[in-house]
């Protein structure tokens, strides 16, 4: 007695190119959604980098702002 491995699919043959197009469209939509979420971060980073390029060398002391009264005061000379 032979055992059946494959089941009959009543939908008929699949349209593979159409399935690939649909999957590609889903992937592209997911990528676009991801880009919409990350685009403000990218824009902010680009603006920070462009503003940082305008800054010149600094000669002086930086004073660290205390978070609490008991935190030590840090002074760094550059």
Image: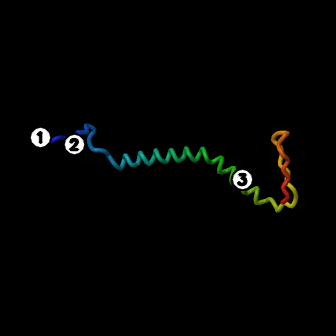
Secondary structure category for the residue under label 1: loop
Question: Whole-Å distance between the Cαs marked 3 and 1?
Answer: 73 Å
**Mark 2, residue position:** 5
Residue identified by numbered label 1: 1
Q: Residues within 10 Å of mark 2 (few under 14, many from 20)?
A: few
Task: Please tell me which residue lies in front, 67 or 42.
Answer: 67
Looking at the rendered structure, the secondary structure element under dot 2 is loop
Residue 38 placement, left or right of 7: right
Q: Residue at x 41, y 48 (%)?
A: 21
Q: Residues within 10 Å of mark 1 (few under 14, many from 20)?
A: few
- Answer left or right for 20 relative to 73: left
Q: Residue at horizontal 45%, vertical 46%? A: 25
Q: Earlier in the sequence, mark 3 or mark 1?
A: 1
Residues at badges 1 and 2 in contact (C-beta under 8 Å)? no
Q: In this figure, which residue is indicated by the disc labeled 3? A: 47
Taking the spot 19% from the left edge, 41% from the top edge, the residue there is 4
Q: Looking at the image, tell me whether mark 3 or mark 2 is earlier in sequence order.
A: 2
In the rendered view of the protein, which quadrant contains the C terminus?
Answer: bottom right
Query: Of discs 3 and 1, which sits in the foreground?
Result: 1
């Amino acid at each position: 007695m032979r055992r059946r491995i494959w089941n009959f699919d009543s939908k008929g043959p699949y349209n593979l190119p159409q399935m690939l197009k649909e999957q590609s469209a889903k992937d592209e939509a997911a990528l676009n959604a991801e880009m919409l979420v990350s685009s403000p971060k990218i824009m902010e980073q680009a603006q920070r980098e462009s503003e940082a390029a305008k800054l010149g060398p600094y000669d002086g002391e930086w004073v660290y702002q205390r978070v609490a009264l008991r935190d030590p005061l840090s002074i760094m000379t550059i």
